[in-house]
Image (cartoon, helix red, strand yellow):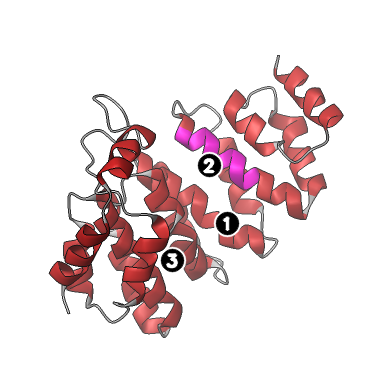
């Protein structure tokens, strides 16, 4: 059982037409955030089905898979990792967390972050008071570390714990990249689903400063009149 076996199965499932579409969808052109990434055209369900067969893949083999140039190999590695984390004891979870944090330069597109950050980083900090690691990620110069910090709060939000995403969203008000705007807006929308008053309080303070994408994502579930109210504040 090794990374080569996993990659071979993924290659068998690849679809060249879907791969071409993925190159555009994940912005792989020169100067774009996914520049140079390679795809073979596996669907996410196909990738998950392969990952399910390799839940006992050793971490050193997961590392080989995560370092692969093919996007679906990295995605599969992360699904394997989240599956391992879900079944692990506390000591093994800590090892997986450290493995994840030490390989974030390979978690280098939004889908890779979004499929894993809340299931590993978020789960680890769910019942812990010291969340300084999340803020270290947010302070990183690496875009993907920053998005990991944001998306990790999804698990906290699901437990009605909103303080960290409110702090991070305020921190990233002046961020330049729309992938950060989208992530913050998405998480704020999740806050609003659980406690609209918390979201509206944040919006009353910061809507005029929020990047328009962040604002639009955050108010997506509001009724039309309330959406217009906050969009007008932004003007």
Q: In screen coordinates, is 82 left or right of 99?
A: right
Q: In what element is the residue under mark 3?
A: helix
Q: Which of marks 1 and 2 is nearer the N terminus?
A: 1
Q: Is residue 61 above or below residue 101?
A: below
- Estimate the x, y position of residue 41 in percent, counting from the top left: 30, 49
Quadrant occupied by the N terminus: bottom left
| Label 1 environment density (alpha carbons within 10 Å; few <14, some 14–19, many ≥20) | many
| Label 3 environment density (alpha carbons within 10 Å; few <14, some 14–19, many ≥20) | many
**Residue at label 1?**
154
Residue 154 visible (yes or no): yes
Residue 103 visible (yes or no): no
Marks 3 & 2, CB-CB < 8 Å contact:
no
Q: In what element is the residue under mark 2?
A: helix
How many numbered discs, if any?
3
Q: In which quarter of the image is residue 101?
A: bottom left
- Estimate the x, y position of residue 157 in percent, counting from the top left: 64, 58
Q: Earlier in the sequence, mark 3 or mark 2?
A: 3
The tag on residue 183 is 2
Q: Give the range drawn in magenta.
A: 179-188
Q: In screen coordinates, is 112 left or right of 6?
A: right
Residue at x-position 32% and y-position 78%: 55
Residue at x-position 34% and y-position 37%: 21
Q: In screen coordinates, is 142 left or right of 132?
A: left
Q: In what element is the residue under mark 1?
A: helix
Quadrant occupied by the C terminus: top right
**Residue at label 3?**
120
């Amino acid at each position: 059982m090794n990374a080569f076996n996993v990659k071979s199965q993924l290659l068998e499932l690849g679809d060249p037409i879907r791969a071409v579409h993925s190159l555009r969808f994940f912005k792989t052109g020169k100067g774009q955030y996914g520049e140079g990434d390679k795809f073979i055209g596996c669907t996410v369900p196909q990738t998950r089905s392969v990952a399910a067969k390799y839940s006992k893949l050793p971490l050193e083999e997961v590392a080989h898979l995560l370092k692969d140039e093919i996007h679906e190999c990295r995605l599969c590695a992360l699904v394997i990792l989240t599956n391992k984390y879900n079944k692990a004891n506390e000591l093994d979870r800590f090892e997986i967390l450290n493995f994840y944090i030490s390989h974030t330069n390979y978690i280098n597109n939004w889908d890779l972050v979004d499929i894993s950050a809340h299931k590993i980083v978020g789960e680890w900090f769910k019942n812990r008071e010291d969340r300084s690691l999340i803020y270290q990620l947010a302070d990183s110069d690496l875009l993907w570390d920053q998005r990991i910090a944001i998306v990790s709060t999804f698990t906290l939000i699901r437990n009605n714990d909103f303080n960290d995403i409110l702090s991070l969203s305020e921190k990233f008000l002046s961020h330049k990249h729309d992938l950060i705007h989208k992530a913050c807006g998405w998480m704020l929308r999740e806050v609003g689903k659980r406690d609209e008053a918390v979201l509206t309080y944040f919006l009353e303070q910061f809507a005029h400063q929020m990047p328009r994408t962040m604002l639009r994502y955050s108010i997506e579930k509001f009724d039309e009149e309330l959406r217009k109210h906050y969009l007008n504040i932004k003007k």
